[in-house]
Amino acid sequence: MKLLEVNNLKKHFSVNDSFLANLLNKNSQVHAVNGVSFSINKGETLSLVGESGCGKSTIGRTILGLYEPTEGEISYCGKKISQMSKKEKFGLKEKMQMIFQDPFSSLNPRQKVKDIIKEPIRSHDIVSREEEKDYILNLLDKVGVDGSYLNRYPHQFSGGQRQRIGIARSLSMEPDFIVADEPISALDVSIQAQILNLLMDLQDEFDLTFLFIAHDLSVVKHISDRVAIMYLGKIFEIGDKKDIFAEPIHPYTKALFNSIPELTTTTKEKFSVLSGDVPDPIQLPQGCYFHSRCKYAEEICLKEKPELKEVNGRKVACHQL
Amino acid sequence: MQREKILEVKNLKTFFNTKDGVIKAVNGVNFDLEKGEILGIVGESGAGKSVTGFSLLRLIDPPGEILEGSIKFKGQDLMKINKRNMNKIRGKKISMIFQDPMASLNPVLTIGQQLIEVLQFHLNYSRKKARNRAVELLNMVGISSPEKRMKHYPNQLSGGMRQRVVVAIALASDPEVIIADEPTTALDVTIQAQIIGLMKNLIKDRQTSLIFITHDLALVSEIADRILVMYAGDIIEYGSKESIISNPAHPYTQGLINSIPVLDKDQKRLKQIKGLMPSPLDLPEGCKFRSRCSKKTDYCKNNDNKLKKINNNHYSTCSEAYQLQKELIAGVG
Ligand SMILES: Nc1ncnc2c1ncn2[C@@H]1O[C@H](COP(=O)(O)OP(=O)(O)O)[C@@H](O)[C@H]1O
Ligand SMILES: Nc1ncnc2c1ncn2[C@@H]1O[C@H](COP(=O)(O)OP(=O)(O)O)[C@@H](O)[C@H]1O
Ligand code: SF4
Ligand SMILES: [Mg+2]
Ligand SMILES: [Mg+2]
């Protein structure tokens, strides 16, 4: 069953009053998301992968209603969110939750752990006042935080513990769908494994559906069912994790996979597989967004945008296939 | 054949006196650096990697203090020379690259001005010669239209380009040692690959030695000749890359290697190291990894934390690993 469907989503930010806009002397737009479509089935994990600035967080935030889409539709359980009533939208706020990269900035430093978790429970009336304490203790237990820490403040915890508290808060409203935006990027490797294991256990226990945002491919491979590779606000390749990791097809996916450091005993001789930088999202290139860095680019790539098409069991947007 | 030792560090100890107590950031470490080699320093945050790097250049400010130790640079003890001579070595013979390129760049000077300044200061180049060399250096680090870029300010460049400029500045004085502290951590992987490839080629050509500090064991395994693993202010494992990655002796290193998801292997659950690194304000006696270690024995609380030889290219502080090795050797003998 499709839980979430995103259809031709675009999100542009205007930067009228920015320094850059003044410099360019025009009404500029940051083209953060440029026509993205995908769906996620219930209980599944879809990962959005790509380098910083390619629009991953913007997609996550737009799905959660933190931004208005510039264009396109998002549907939840088959219903377009834009056509939902106020009441339905409020209900959706319980069902869809977010886990952030930096647990510190997402937790109020002046609130004790119990209040951090209590707040959403009360505003959405999840349990009665009598049950509240047990409910919170149970949540903390599920995420592996000792119940005796109820009265502590965020700064009294390590990064990993804070992330657990952030996860407990997200779970407090019994959500079905979670956007996890780089939830382990700020943590040390040994702690990353702890949190990844926790997320996967919770997914099994509560039948959660994840949109997992990350740039670390080994982590993505570990946690995902399906993967979408993004560049400049577009999906270049999307499909089953197994297929894509077995054989990346899009020239950018290939380059990205080649750049990932891997544990080895032999010194790597050849680095630098891609030259140059990602183009500026204010002035999108013509044709394929990747053509300035692509070694396969030909005439058509400079003129026409490639659309996603079926190749070897997944979808790829490239003219040269 | 033994290569020339550029740096020899003995019993280096750097503490910070804070109002909460003494932070034992670096607890008497010993290592050396050979000519032309890449030495990787890995460990999780707070392990003491950066403080080690800064200490080598005597860049520790109060409340920090280098309490003990010698840092021999080509035989000369840097701990014993005066400030003026140290300033001459720093940035010229030994240069440093940081995670944040803006920490090394001056935002109000153009890229060209900064490069020219370094060349004039350290190499006494004339202005004209420095200018030409600056363009050459920018070209060398893969900056396109270097003439044009000379006139740009740091904020007009992307993060990757800024770090390339920092590499150019670090190389400008033709140093013998570069200390790079997480130089690519803030960059995307494709840009990281560009910068690492670039650094590797440039130093290989000149036989420069590189100390590469990172939390990323996979990255370090791709470039280092030898690896040094730090934990709570100690070097807990030290040796050739091949030996450490294929045969990690310390349970912490083993745990680190096991907790990295591997691309070409399917695992349902990752092996995790439980718990946290102890606070540097309150370090336990004996082996500092003890509370997290699944292999600990009674002996571990008496561990002296000295590196013990496993073979000619491999040392570890773990007493268990050492015991095991001795038994193996005894068994063979
Ligand atoms: N609130 C905003 N206002 C203006 N520009 C933004 C805003 N949020 C993101 N952007 C821009 O949109 C692009 C995509 O950003 P983001 O979605 O955060 O990327 P990612 O999460 O993949 O790193 C970037 O160029 C970013 O600078
Ligand atoms: N200026 C300072 N004042 C007080 N403590 C410091 C200072 N710099 C580093 N430390 C402490 O020294 C220890 C080692 O830090 P550092 O070398 O930066 O770790 P790493 O680079 O391995 O992440 C940490 O506990 C850190 O908090
Ligand atoms: S469409 Fe052309 S430029 Fe784009 S990735 Fe394919 S070959 Fe390269
Ligand atoms: Mg983001
Ligand atoms: Mg550091």
Image: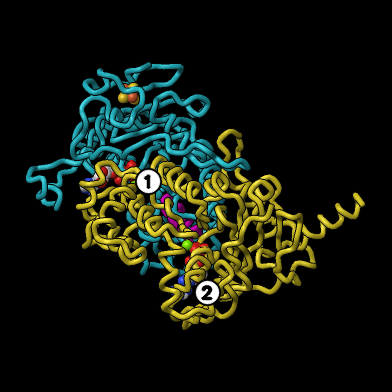
Chain colours: A cyan, B yellow
* Left or right: where B312 falls relative to A83: right
- Above or below — where is B296 with respect to A222? below
Of helix, strand and loop, which one carries label 1? Answer: strand
Disc 2 target residue: B78
Three-letter code, disc 1 = Gln
Instruction: Give the image quarter of residue A95.
Output: top left
Of helix, strand and loop, which one carries label 2? Answer: helix
Chain under label 2?
Answer: B
Instruction: Give the image quarter of residue B236.
Output: bottom right
Residue that appears at 75% across and 57% down: B295
Disc 1 target residue: A97
Residue that appears at 29% across and 19% down: A298
Q: Which residues are magenta?
A: A158-171
- Above or below — where is B298 with respect to A25? below
User: Quick check: is A166 in the magenta stretch?
Assistant: yes
Which tag is nearer the camera, tag 1 or tag 2?
A: 2
Identify the residue at the far left of this view: A25
Chain under label 1?
Answer: A
Residue A310: percent from left, percent from top:
39, 16
Residue that appears at 53% across and 67% down: B52
Residue that appears at 43% across and 79% down: B83
Residue B90 versus residue A229: which sits nearer the camera? B90
Residue B227: percent from left, percent from top:
61, 54
Q: Main secondary structure of the magenta part?
A: helix
